[in-house]
Image (tube, coloured by chain):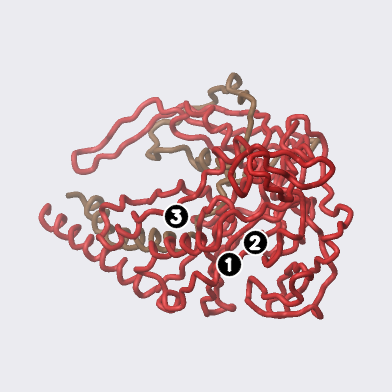
Amino acid sequence: MSDDGGLGLLLLGPAGATGLYWMLYRYYRNTDKSHAFERETKVEAKPVTGAEQDRKVDEVKGTQSKRIEDDNVHDYRDRVERIRGDSS
Amino acid sequence: MSNTTPPPVPPTGPGSPRDVPPLPRTFPVDPASLPEPIRDELQAPDPVAIDTASEELKDGANRCPKCGSTEIKQRPGTDLLVCLFCRNEWHGQRVEEEFGFGEGIDQLKGTVIASGARDIQADAASLMSFKCGGCGAEVTVNTETAMTARCHWCRHVFGVNEQVANGAVPDAVLPFHIKKDDAVARIRQFVDKRRLFALKAFKEQFTPENVVAVYLPYMIVDGNASADVAGHGEIKTREYTRGSDDNKKTYYDADVYQVQRHVDFTVDDLPLESSRERGNLNTRVNTNNIINTILPFDTKNAVKWNASYLNGITSEKRDLDVEELRPQLEDQLLSIARAQVEDSVNRYDRGVRWERERLDVHGTRWVSMYLPVWLYSYHQPGGNGGMLHYIAVNGRTGETMGSVPVQQWKLLAAAITVGTFLEGIALWIVGNSS
């Protein structure tokens, strides 16, 4: 067993305790719940456009992270820099 | 891409309502792996809620309250509706047809505001707003049936002398469908699923029969908008491991793409809290997110405002105007746009980092509405005035959500016990392998 693996395994107790605490806390208090308007509102959208303009700009070699840095594709409510146009 | 502004204040921490809420009945860990008492609570059935996205909303059927028939016509010359099957007559005209809401959303231009302050009709004159002397909340009272009232937030009793200037009468009201017995049963079922670690005082004082019916003010918004988002996405090209047996590490190669998407969309009946206090969803100081969660309502079935619907039911006055709610609407429209474009970037299997977004709102239509909520509250004493915990039942669909105060030492003890057990297993594995 390597040091890394052993250390990781020893964290199992504290991590499990913290995880269970937060899971039950949220189950009772429901602080993470809100109106899921993204999926519960009637939205009619025209087909999404812009895919044809996607272009390769760079390559990443030998990274250890499984996802792109600051991945927010599922975090719809995570606001990013807002570009203001003339009409809004 | 003319001028740019910094992003708004970031969301308040993980697990806050600024996060996209999890799907119903999903847990971070498999309940089967947990001790039996906890598992039983987690897996107990939830109170049944009618899916507003289905029947009631789709067909928009307005049924006769007596026999359930949909053979209903307006009685000529009156506002009465008559059931052609059982001859039952009643009041109420759906604003959906009356004002043409729900039609031509894709043609909306500019800001259309329904006259939330229509000419005061005979029944509205008897309606008065009061400021509660106990907590400062504003409560609407139909003075024809009562000159005193009990505040639905703090249960303070007050009288006519504390009257404040009357506010807006809404365009429409959605009458209660869920009866009190039903609401009580749902609240009981909800709390029965959460007893093991609940605060002892809460369990002792739990009397769901004290639930109150309340009409809360909302703005129902239709919108026609376009959104542009831009950022970077990555596609994995290679995955490989390096290092010896004991120290293997996985590495990835990826292509980086510049990504941008455009979507035109319309939203129908998006509800926004139009009470300043109720719109504050800070879970550190209140549990308003509970009331927010039981949205949406079948607002298609709302009827033209009539104070007689409020007989014996308290209500809260609207205190936010369209312009004050616009930032919140734009925020939600951007979130909806981001959800809409998600499927179009599936090929980026390492995810997408959106960096810029732009929203063009072409047109919006605003209707103010009272929506029916059954509300049970429990005040937990503590610092800063404690915490008011709500359990709310949607007065139309029966969707139930609540905040049950926890007994901290019990929860901590359970977590530490499970943690110690896991640590024991870990130590055993480490000890045996070295």
Q: Amino acid at mark 2?
A: Asn
Can you identify the residue that label 1 sits on?
Answer: B286
Q: Quadrant of the C terminus of chain B?
A: bottom left
Residue A7 percent coordinates (x, y): 25, 56
Classify residue B101 as left or right of residue A19: right
Q: Which chain is red?
A: B
Residue B310 percent coordinates (x, y): 71, 62
Tags 2 and 1 touching, CB below 8 Å: yes
Is there one chain holding both mark 2 and mark 1?
Answer: yes
Chain A colour? brown
Of mark 1 and mark 3, the one earlier in the sequence is 3
Furthest residue in direction left, as rendered: B432
Q: Nearer the viewer, residue B378 or B423?
A: B378
Chain letter for the residue marked with disc 3 in the picture: B
**Image disc number at residue B47:** 3
Q: Secondary structure at mark 2?
A: loop
Furthest residue in direction top, as rendered: A52
Crowding at dot 2, Cα within 10 Å, few <14 / some 14-19 / many 20+, comes out as: some
**Image disc number at residue B280:** 2
Find the distance from the CA under tag 1 to the CA under tag 3.
23 Å
Q: Quadrant of the N terminus of chain B?
A: top right
For image coordinates 31% across by 50% down, the residue present is B30
Of mark 2 and mark 1, the one earlier in the sequence is 2
Residue A42 percent coordinates (x, y): 62, 37
Q: Amino acid at mark 1?
A: Asn
For image coordinates 79% across by 69% down, the residue present is B144
